[in-house]
Image: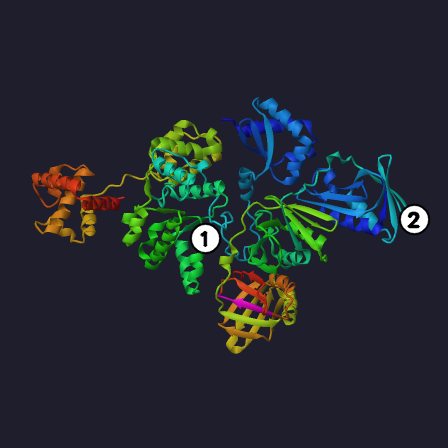
Amino acid sequence: MKLECSVEKIKNAIVNAARVTSKNLTLPALQSILLVASGKSLKIRATNLNLGIEIEIPAKIEKEGVALIKADVIGNFFSSINPKEQTTLSLENDNLLITTKNSKTIVKNYPHDDFPTIPRVSGEVISIPSKKFIEGFKNVYYAASISEGKPEIASIYIYPEDDMFVFVATDSFRLAEKKVKIKTQSPIPTIIIPIKNATEILRVFDGEDEEMRIEMTKNQIAFSLGSTYITSRLIDGTFPDYKQIMPKTQTTDVVVLKQDLLGVLKTSNIFSDKFNQITLVVKPKEKLLAFKAKNTDVGESTSTLAGALSGENIEVSLNYKYLLDCLQVIPQDSISIGFSGNNKAIIIRGVSDNSFTYLVMPMNR
Amino acid sequence: MLDTKELWGKCLLEIEGELSKANFSTWFKNTFILKEDGGVIQIGVPNEFVKDWLLNKYSKLIMRVLNNNYEYVRGAEYVIAKNESKQKAEEVAPINKLLINKELPLQDLYINKDDNLNPRYTFDTFIVGRFNEFAYAAAQAIIKTPGMTYNPFFVYGNTGLGKTHLIQAVGNTIKEKYPEKKVFYITLERFATDFINAIQASKANSFKEKYRKYDVIIIDDIQFVGKMEKIQEELFHLFNAFYENNRQIIFSSDKHANYIPGLEERLKSRFAQGMILDIGEPEYESRVAILKAKAGEYRSLLPDEIIEYVAEVLQGNIRELEGSLNTIICQTQLKNRPLTVTEIKTFLKNNIKAKKSVSVKDVVKIIADFYHIEEESIYEKTRRKEIVKARQIVMYILREDFNISYPLIGQKLGGKDHTTVIHSYLKIKNDLKKDMGLSQELEQIKALFK
């Protein structure tokens, strides 16, 4: 193998691919990146058997060939080189020789027989704007469960509704739902995609604004955008029927400025206990909206906030971290918080935006 | 039958010897044999990556090893599938970290949202015996030509006899066989709630549309419709819409349509127009078959004599049968040896229902209540027509169903002569031959004793 390419291109590709490699599996091939030089391009592949990625970058190929290199080594190496330069990669005595303007580096090459194939998905093809799709991911992914006990909710659930895609994630304590209008020629079926893979896909494609091709079968989905191809397994299961827990009536409504709320939550951060508990007191008649945080080891604090309040008096406790999470993705300046009783889920939305809904369960006291 | 588990175990042992530990654990962990069909072995793998790899790299090795252990093998296929038994073992350790946080009341993860069917209910796990072979045959006919043969299909039987299993299995099979057909399963209670919500939101039309778009509708526990007049009307219209378009309707109930109290005539007659079938209680042989099937992988721990004993003493409800079996399996695992019949006797003593003893007094009370007359009047010497009839029925039932001697019946019912009792018994017996109304009344009364 012998080829020449730009440091910047190969660095970006390798950094993206290195994230996909697995750290704790016993098979060394899975901690490595496969470089395939053929035709007019260099293909960079990595997989952890959950997610597979292939990135193609332009390169001047003098001699075709394959190399398998430890991902962390080559990733760190290219990050340290001036990205403006060109680099040459070649196999010498079964090791990979990397030459740049000022350096010569030899990296150990592993036998590539053990490197798994990256499945090619051939199924329905859907073309959609990547920006919209990634927006859906971004709005909900933080709410997904991280425990693998229930794979169905350690995932993002995507399903079509009218002309919209609905993205949902929950860890059973809170739930985020985002509806995004996306035009496609053919409707998408329902997808449950593992959250770990979804975050990687989000990271790789974030910032892109092109048409993305999605292909899927019952168990596998593949995204291709530009020269990047990512394939992930899908969860074969059923997402919980969350619609029925959406509170239908609200007894208390609160509208506050997002900036104010963020400020109050910052204070709460200092005084909340180990469960991140804060207590919200709403008394519309007295025009009182107070946030209380108390930690027996530190002290306690009460902050009040101006806002439009209506409905019945209510006092609930919740995990303020859950509140903070959703504030990051709400673009509106005003936040509406709806209560429907002491032990019922709290609804949070951006004012006058029905496309995003966030549910939080209050805490037991 | 080929024991696929054992076969795969042997194969894995051989494969393990030929590969490095890392390779083996990466690629062969979580694989299993899904099924064997005419020499072709389907190997279940956890995901596409493993499937590709086994196919490209190890298919020769796998074929060779399969051949060594099973001479009839002709080929191997790789299918992505979940290993159910593994899955369950993993679920046992729940994570209870933030107990203080309340969970969103999310529903069971298992049921398919589009059609409400539980994929666990299939005909593969449905055991056919004398008690349900009719219902099973009818169900098969429906699957062959949905909407044409028996429409509507009405199954009734006591709780825990497999009604829900049967009708859901019909739904699941139709779905599998005719992917274009839309199947929908709902319990009457959900149907009613849905209807009420639709009315409240003044969206009655969208409610109608929602249900009319299906090709097969399955409504469970229809007996509760008795008290809901509006729902009956809606059901009536839904029924007509389905029936006219030859779309299949399936109901289940715990009693015959004619005995659902408060059910309107027009619905009764419509239910009767297709096929009404009952699922009875499983007889001894079926109970043995059910227990053997349910024991599944624990079969080796349960000798036949235990299964036969359990089938002998536990009669009736399949659900209770299953519960008792679980107790036994659990105890066996705990003790790590097969249990003796004596031990099982002690475990089961709470589950064995004593044969219900009904006293003469109870019979009189039930029948008096049924005819809305005073209980005491049965014992008195009145000759009012309605009381005479009730009294005669009491005598008939005591003789026919409880086998009490004529003189004793007479004595218990206020000192009547035994010839009076004989006369009453014969009279009712004769009337039954002519009077259909009377025999229906008797059926209803008998149902009250259960």
> B330 or B135, which lies in front?
B135
Q: Is residue B305 left or right of residue B262?
A: right
Cα distance in 3D space between marks 1 and 2: 71 Å
Q: In the picture shown, does residue B295 fall above or below A229?
A: above
Secondary structure under tag 1 reads: loop
Chain of the residue on which disc 2 is drawn = A
Q: Nearer the viewer, mark 1 or mark 2?
A: 1
Q: Residue A344's x, y, as percent?
A: 50, 62
Say which residue appears at 55% left-offset and 26% top-offset.
B39
Q: Residue A45's x, y, as percent?
A: 74, 43
> B132 or A77, which lies in front?
B132
Q: Residue B176's x, y, as percent?
A: 49, 41
Q: Is residue B16 visible?
A: no
Secondary structure under tag 2 reads: loop
- Which range is magenta? A335-341
Sort mark 1 into few (<14), some (14-19) or many (20+) by Cα contacts within 10 Å.
few
Sort mark 2 into few (<14), some (14-19) or many (20+) by Cα contacts within 10 Å.
few
Name the residue type under label 2.
Answer: Asn
Which residue lies under the disc numbered 1? B213
Determine which quarter of the picture holds residue A321. bottom right
Q: Is residue A339 magenta?
A: yes
Q: Is residue A120 visible?
A: yes
Q: Which mark is residue A102?
A: 2
Q: Is residue B367 left or right of residue B9?
A: left
